[in-house]
Amino acid sequence: MTDAPEIFIDISTAIMRVAGDDLLCRMVEPQDETANHRPRLPFGPFMPDQHRTMEIGLRHWVREQVGVDLGHVEQLYTFADQGRLRDSEAPDRHTVSVGYLALANKAASESGDGPSLWRNIYSFFPWEDWRDGRPACLDEAIIPALDNWLTASPEAQERVRLAFGRDRDQWDEEFVLERYEILYEAGLTEESYLEGRSPKPLYEGIPGASLQLDHRRILATALGRLRGKFKYRPVIFDLMAPTFTLTQLQKTAEAILGVCLHKQNFRRMVEKSNFLDSTGKMEKARGRPAELFRFRHGDRADRPLSGLRISSSRPRRG
């Protein structure tokens, strides 16, 4: 009878905020060369002898590591594939990661154990940002590389068609994880090469910065969850300042979804939701002043944010 492997539980957190037109994610810079100069998500161990729940533990060590006081927090998935995190010093240890999504509405201090920074989330997934039209990297690099892969893996044809909106299918902005996992499986990410899943560096020429461990997979899960939840719960307001203009609210929505929205249609949807109160004040800025609004917090638990289900007008190419 063999000994059971040691189970180690860590909590990995995708912390997001919006600054201007950018959806940002908090990263921790590598402290040694073994990480191949790749940043990582903030993560730490779950210690039940010190913290009653995972969320309490998460908030504690995130504050210590990167100086962020978290707002909205929700658990994503448990990542526990066998052999996913190999530890040469503890080969019998199996690491289970519990992924979390957390939202912050303002920048935090730079205190903590090491250097940390905010990075544009689309630097890791450039094919997900359609605000300037269909990303050129899709037709110039990703689709041709996937076509080459499909010649040897025809069973994946349907998955690629659905995830990447090929033929007559529409691109679905919520399929962030599905698209990333196809690219990983096809050997088109640096992570799949470094982890020995691809014999050749097929990812060269495919844009998108890599992360340590499987943190880009966790980040893809978080972005897909945020995009999906945006359409039926008012999570967007966890990313807003206490008061904001309708233009600022629209820019935040566009940053989350990776698309441009029609100004008048968006404002009609927001007005229909009845989630905003006017402050009676105007923004102090150059040019034409804009009215300031605040979120009606008392309605958060009672109603979904119906009416913000955005229909895409993206072209069906690929």
Image (cartoon, rainbow, N blue to C red):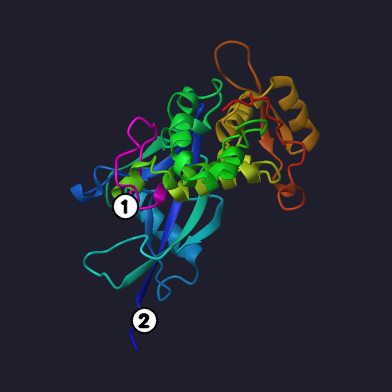
Question: Going from the N terminus, do you reach mark 2 or mark 1 first?
Answer: 2
What amino acid is labelled 2 in the image?
A: Ala
Counting labels gives 2
Q: Name the residue type under label 1.
A: Glu
Query: Is 76 left, or right, of 278 in this rendering?
Result: left
Residue under circle 1? 195
Magenta stretch, main secondary structure, is loop
Residue 185 can be seen in this image = yes
**Of 310 and 72, the residue lying toward us:** 310
Measure how far apart labels 2 and 1 are at the Cα level. 24 Å
Asked where in the image residue 289 lies, by quadrant, the reply is top right
Neighbor class of circle 1 (other Cα within 10 Å; few <14, some 14-19, many 20+) is: some
Q: Which residues are magenta?
A: 196-216
Give x and y (percent) for residue 103: 52, 46
Q: Which residue in the rendered view is the most extreme toward the left?
A: 33
Image location of residue 175, percent across then percent down: 58, 42
Q: Is residue 304 above or below residue 282?
A: below
Residue at the image point whose x is 21% and y is 67% from the top? 89
Q: Residue at x 42, y 56 (%)?
A: 12
Residue marked by disc 2:
4
Question: How far from the left and from the top, in percent, is residue 122?
Answer: 46, 33
SS class, disc 1: loop
